[in-house]
Amino acid sequence: MGGSFPIPVSVLTGFLGAGKTTLLNRLLKDPALADTAVIINEFGEVAIDHLLVEQASDGIIQLSDGCLCCTVRGDLVDTLADLVDRLQTGRIAKLARVVVETTGLADPAPVLQSIMAHPALVQAFRLDGVVTLVDAVNGEATLDAHVEAVKQAAVADRVVLAKTDLADAAEVEALRTRLKQINPGAVVLDVNEAGTGAAALFNCGLYDPETKSADVRRWLGEEAAHGHDNHHGHDHHDGDHDHRHHEHRHDARVRTHSLVHDGPVSFSAIEMFLDLLRSTHGEKLLRMKGVIELAEDPSRPLVIHGVQKILHPPARLPAWPDGQRGTRLVLITLDMPQDYIQRLFAAFTNKPSVDTPDRAALEANPLAIAGL
């Protein structure tokens, strides 16, 4: 059977007119994307200018280099399940990667959840990352007008600026700064620069194919956030400290929380922290990534990855890849009470915090900390 499971899935999102079709066409010519299936919302909206389309059948277009393009049939789960079936029955020779292109107005969360939550799909696929395209000409206005566009930028692993050649250089720089405030952990790239190919856009999951190991720091976005006022254990509040951004009302609703605990944490404490967080404010939790040192087995880190209330089945790494133990969580939230996450995390890791009840009191009345 061609390809090995789980197959990486990348989600390509971005607002209407951001330039996703142009990027897709360029990527489909990239030799690094051979044996890739591209799932497109509607073929009619995407003009594939590939040199040779070999055959089109059953909603799937076979491209000359072995790439596949298919439309979302019914829902994404059906389409992904169909790809697995084709692979297992030999109708597809090999499948190395899947790229899902979302509609311009889409909130990417349901797409991510369908990959993370379906019991069969979670065996066959793994979420590699989210690539968000932002139009440099209209990006500022789009972010101002649509909270969905801010959410698309906030959940991204890679933000790609398109049409920078048509925009004023100062405007592009202001947009870059703004995107870094919305999402300090994302790598910001320019679609017009030579290095923005498949290698730069994809492989942003925990596993690094080049080193054949897990790259925790890169996956958590710590390298991108480094130098962007990134203090462990503190919130990054977007726009509050920059008077130029006060008019960007949506931006201030997004926060990035970095939670660090230097010692091991019991599985029950982490489980209760996550359950409480998701049950009280799950819809406000845009994305969550974490690597946890468990008290029960400190030698093998627990990896968690979630989108809103959906948590990918937790995985265990065979060993600590970078030698740095402890618990590191990165949460991106929308409209979350300011210090709620910090206080909750402190309560479960027994860190002293102002006005935090002791753990026994918290377990007896867990919602008290939320002020509910």
Image (tube, helix red, strand yellow):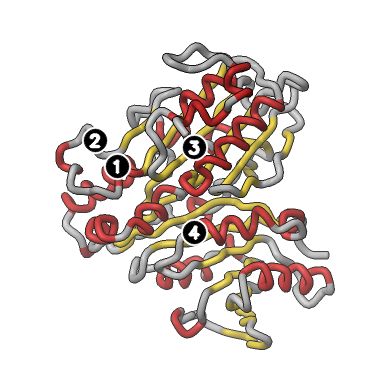
Q: For this rendering, which residue is in front, 235 or 339? A: 339
x and y percentages locating residue 274 in the rendered image: 60, 35
Residues marked 2 and 1 touching at CB (< 8 Å): yes
Q: Which mark is residue 108?
A: 4
Q: Which residue is mark 3?
A: 331
Q: Earlier in the sequence, mark 3 or mark 4?
A: 4
- Rendered image quadrant of residue 305: top right
Locate the N terminus by quadrant.
Answer: bottom right
Horizontally, residue 278 falls left or right of residue 302, namely left
Residues marked 3 and 4 touching at CB (< 8 Å): no
Residue drawn where x is 47% and y is 57% of the image: 197
Q: Amino acid at mark 2?
A: Asp
Q: Which residue is mark 2?
A: 240
Label 2 packing within 10 angstroms: few (<14), some (14-19), many (20+): few
Q: Amino acid at mark 3?
A: Leu
Q: Earlier in the sequence, mark 2 or mark 1?
A: 2
x and y percentages locating residue 220 in the rendered image: 52, 36
Spatial CA span between label 1 and label 3: 15 Å
Q: Amino acid at mark 1?
A: Ala
Q: Which residue is mark 1?
A: 252
Q: Amino acid at mark 4?
A: Pro
**Circle 1 — which element?**
helix
**Circle 2 — which element?**
loop
| Foreground disc of the pair 1, 4 | 1
Question: Against 92, is 336 above or below?
Answer: above
Q: Earlier in the sequence, mark 1 or mark 3?
A: 1
Residue drawn where x is 43% and y is 39% of the image: 185
Spatial CA span between label 3 and label 4: 16 Å
Spatial CA span between label 2 and label 1: 7 Å
